[in-house]
Structure formats: structure tokens, C-alpha cells
């Protein structure tokens, strides 16, 4: 059974700083999704990573996937307050239809 | 093009009552997933359905919970004889193709927040 571990679970940082969220998973997966959730809201798709070494960037966010290490990272560059939200990684086990969510990283960016 | 529509947005039930949660997928999507989210937790997969078929119900509790996605109309998640522990946010997602297909993205609805008194 695919297990997902995100860390940190909570992150408070100053505007302008850089930081990385880590997502480890337990079994073979060749695709992984990152979602954003604002409080009380639904989930918004950020990135789909489909192969080993995949890197995607959108604005101040960059996501990467290392399938050999079973690790994905979400890197935040020069954080701004608008990025405050909870970020979930969700790998998909090979051959499976469903995706499995991590517990989420609650990111709070201080002005 | 409307997104995934869930209703009601908030639902209050007393213990022992039934809860019916509805999900209309995005236009052109025939695959629906239901998830449950407890406060401060990630989403837990419950069930994956295609029109008129349950594909994967490995996350559904064995009793009191059922789901359907009829040929016409929305997908329904039904919880019978609700208990306090059923209080959570229930999210529905839809996708245009089978979950296994590469790059198949799930699009989420706004959720139904169920409170059991």
C-alpha cells in the first residue's frame, strides 16, 4: 500500500525567503501531483510530474520528481504572502487509478 | 464550462439520520472520485466510479456508506445512520479518462461539509 510522508507539516516563513517542501512515498510510482488548498476551499492542481527527473515551474514554485529516491520536492523562491496555503503532494502507484494524498504542508508566509 | 459541482455545501444531520451528498462532474468527464478530509488532515480516498460502475471502493467503510454514479444525473455518496465521527469535508473530483492514464488530472469540487450533531 502506497504511503506518503510530507515534511514539514507546518512552515512559517518570512516574505522573500526560499524554502523546500519534501514528499517521500513508499512504493513504485511514476507520476505525482501537487495541489494547493486555501482554508475552507477546494483543491487547485499545481503540477503534474510524469517521469523521473521531471521539473516543472510556475512563478515562484518549482516541483521536481526523483522516482528512484521516491521523492518529490516543491521549492518556493522569494516567498510572498499570497502563497500562504496548504500544499499537498499526491503520488499515484503504478497501475492504480487513485492518487494518495500526503497530510499536507501548511505554509504561512509572514509579511 | 462549469467545474465540478457539489451540493449541498454544508449539511447538518442528527445522529441516526441519512446524509446524501451530490456531485456533478465537469462536462465531458465520466470518472468520479470521492474523498474525505478531516480537520488538519489530507484527503483520504473513498471510492472511484465510472458511469454505472464502481471501479475501486477500497477506501469505503464497510457499513453505512455507499456510492453510485447513474447513467443520468449526479454521483451520490450516501451515508446511512450518521455518527459524530462522520463529520468531515467530503470532496468529489472528476477526470475525463481512466485514472491510470498518464497525466490524467483530477479536478475537485468545492466540497460538502457535513456536521453531525
Image: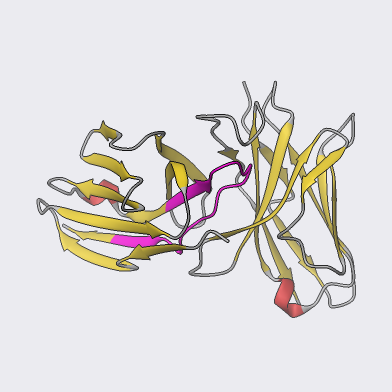
Residue nearest the observer in this picture, B94 or B73 = B94
Question: Which quadrant is the N terminus of chain B positioned in?
Answer: top right
Does B40 sit left or right of A81 as displayed?
A: right
Name which quarter of the figure residue B99 lies in: top right
Question: Which residue is pictured at 15% across the width and 45% down the height?
Answer: A77
Question: Which quadrant is the C terminus of chain B positioned in?
Answer: bottom right
Q: Position of residue B3 (x, y in %)?
A: 61, 31
Question: Which residue is pictured at 58% across the width and 61% down the height?
Answer: A1
Q: Position of residue B14 (x, y in %)?
A: 83, 75
Question: Which residue is pictured at 80% across the width and 77% down the height?
Answer: B83
Q: Is residue B1 above or below residue B25?
A: above
Question: Magenta segment, which residues?
Answer: A89-107
Name which quarter of the figure residue B17 lies in: bottom right
Residue nearest the observer in this picture, B52 or A95 = A95
Q: Position of residue B28 (x, y in %)?
A: 70, 21
Q: Is residue A94 magenta?
A: yes
Does A108 sit left or right of A94 as displayed?
A: left
Q: Position of residue B42 (x, y in %)?
A: 51, 62
Q: Is residue B49 magenta?
A: no
Residue nearest the observer in this picture, B87 or A51 = A51
Does A66 sit left or right of B79 as displayed?
A: left
Amino acid at each position: 500500500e502506497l504511503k506518503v510522508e510530507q515534511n514539514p507539516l507546518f512552515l512559517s516563513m518570512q516574505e522573500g525567503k526560499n524554502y523546500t517542501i519534501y514528499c517521500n512515498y513508499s512504493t513504485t510510482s511514476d507520476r505525482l501531483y501537487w495541489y494547493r488548498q486555501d482554508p475552507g476551499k477546494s483543491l487547485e492542481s499545481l503540477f503534474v510530474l510524469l517521469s523521473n527527473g521531471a521539473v516543472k515551474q510556475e512563478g515562484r514554485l518549482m516541483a521536481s520528481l526523483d522516482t528512484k529516491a521516491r521523492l518529490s520536492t516543491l521549492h518556493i523562491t522569494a516567498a510572498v504572502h499570497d502563497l500562504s496555503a496548504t500544499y499537498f503532494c499526491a503520488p499515484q502507484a503504478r497501475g492504480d487509478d487513485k492518487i494518495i494524498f500526503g497530510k499536507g504542508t501548511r505554509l504561512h508566509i509572514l509579511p | 464550462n462549469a467545474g465540478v459541482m457539489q451540493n449541498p455545501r454544508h449539511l447538518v444531520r442528527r445522529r441516526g439520520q441519512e446524509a446524501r451528498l451530490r456531485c456533478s462532474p465537469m462536462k465531458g468527464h465520466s470518472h468520479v472520485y470521492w474523498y474525505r478530509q478531516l480537520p488538519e488532515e489530507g484527503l483520504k480516498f473513498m471510492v472511484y466510479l465510472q458511469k454505472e460502475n464502481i471501479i475501486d471502493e477500497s477506501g469505503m467503510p464497510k457499513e453505512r456508506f455507499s456510492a453510485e454514479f447513474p447513467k443520468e444525473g449526479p454521483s451520490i455518496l450516501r451515508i446511512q445512520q450518521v455518527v459524530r465521527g462522520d463529520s468531515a469535508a467530503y470532496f468529489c473530483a472528476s477526470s475525463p479518462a481512466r485514472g491510470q492514464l498518464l497525466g490524467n488530472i483530477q479536478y475537485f469540487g468545492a466540497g460538502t461539509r457535513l456536521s453531525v450533531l
